[in-house]
Image: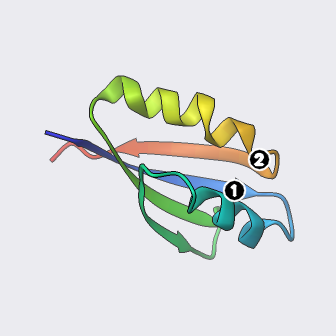
Amino acid sequence: MPIRAYILINTKIGETQKVADELKKIPEVKKLDIIMGPYDIIIEIEVPGYEDISAILLNKLQSIPSINHTMTCPVVS
C-alpha cells in the first residue's frame, strides 16, 4: 500500500511559481497547490514506503535552491 504525505513548503520571496514548476516535474508529487499563509506551497506525495519520503526530501526538494523551509506531514489513515 502506498504511503502519502503532505509537505508544506516556504519559498524565497518572488520564487513561488518557479518552485512550483520544478515540483511538478517530480513524479511522486500527486497534487500541488499554491497557498497563502506561513507556507507558500503544499504538495501531496505518494511513495512506496516511509523511507522514500526522506529520499524525496533529501534528493529532490533540497536540490531546489529557492526552497527555504519544509514541514512534512505523513498521512496515518
Instruction: Specify the quadrant of the image occupied by residue 48.
Output: top left
* Residue drawn 63% across the image and 42% down it: 61
Q: Amino acid at mark 1?
A: Asn
Label 2 crowd (10 A; few <14 / some 14-19 / many >=20):
few
Looking at the image, residue 63 sits to the left or right of residue 34; the answer is right
**Neighbours of disc 1 within 10 Å: few (<14), some (14-19), many (20+):** many
Give me the disc on residue 68.
2
Callout 2: SS: strand
Identified by mark 2, the residue type is Asn
| Observer-nearest of 54 and 24 | 24
Relative to residue 6, is residue 56 depicted above or below?
above
Q: Secondary structure at mark 1?
A: strand
Q: Is residue 51 left or right of residue 68?
A: left
Contact, mark 1 vs mark 2 (Cβ under 8 Å): yes
In the picture, measured across the screen, residue 46 lies left or right of residue 27, that is left
Task: Give the percent coordinates (x, y) of residue 51.
Answer: 37, 23
Q: Position of residue 60 (x, y in %)?
A: 61, 38
Distance in Å between CA atoms under marks 1 and 2:
6 Å
* 32 is higher (above) or lower (below) than 43: below
Residue drawn at point x = 64 percent, y = 71 percent: 37
Residue 36: which quarter of the image?
A: bottom right
Q: Quadrant of the N terminus?
A: top left
Q: Which residue is mark 1?
A: 10
